[in-house]
Image (spheres, rainbow, N blue to C red):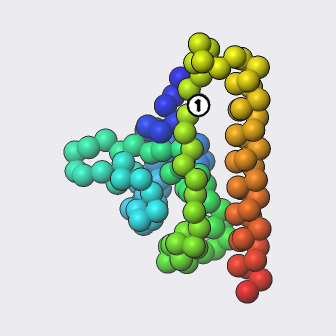
Amino acid sequence: MTDRNNLTLTVAADMVGIKGTMLRRWAEYHKDYLSPGANPLAGVTRRFTSRDVEILKYIAELRSQGLTVGGINVRLATLTFPDIEENEQNSDLVPEADTTEIALSTKQEGLQSTQAIVVALQLCKRK
């Protein structure tokens, strides 16, 4: 299983749908909004979190709308992206049926958060 909070550049780029070289550039352009692992010190392997990937997907959407790096950073400054943690299941603690219910609940909450971001963006466009 891939640790969604320790993704390689190649895996993260594939998830966003861009090339690794572009992802490196975006990570530098938007470093204030990404995890420290997205822009590590020299000699340290670059790693991305699930949250980073969601932000980068949003950046891709904004770029497709023609926004510049500065414009994208202005938008990112007004938003909050939730941390996305990998669900660890422990069958000794949580029965399987309860785990499914929790997973569905978590997925629904994520959908609601995404819908809230879309509504906020639509309101920003109208101004």
The image shows residue 75 at horizontal and vertical percentages of 58, 73
Work out whether residue 86 or residue 8 is closer to the camera in this orientation and state it.
86
Taking the view exactly as shown, the residue that stands out farthest to the front is 93
**In which quadrant is the C terminus drawn?**
bottom right
User: 10 Å neighbourhood of mark 1: few (<14), some, or many (≥20)?
Assistant: few
Give residue 92's quadrant in the image. Answer: top right
Taking the view exactly as shown, the residue that stands out farthest to the left is 43
Work out whether residue 29 or residue 103 is closer to the camera in this orientation and state it.
103
Work out whether residue 56 or residue 95 is closer to the camera in this orientation and state it.
95
Taking the view exactly as shown, the residue that stands out farthest to the bottom is 127
Is residue 36 in view? yes
**Amino acid type of the residue tagged 1 in the rendering:** Asn
The image shows residue 26 at horizontal and vertical percentages of 46, 60
Q: Secondary structure at mark 1?
A: loop
Is residue 10 in view? no
Q: Which residue is mark 1?
A: 87
The image shows residue 126 at horizontal and vertical percentages of 77, 83
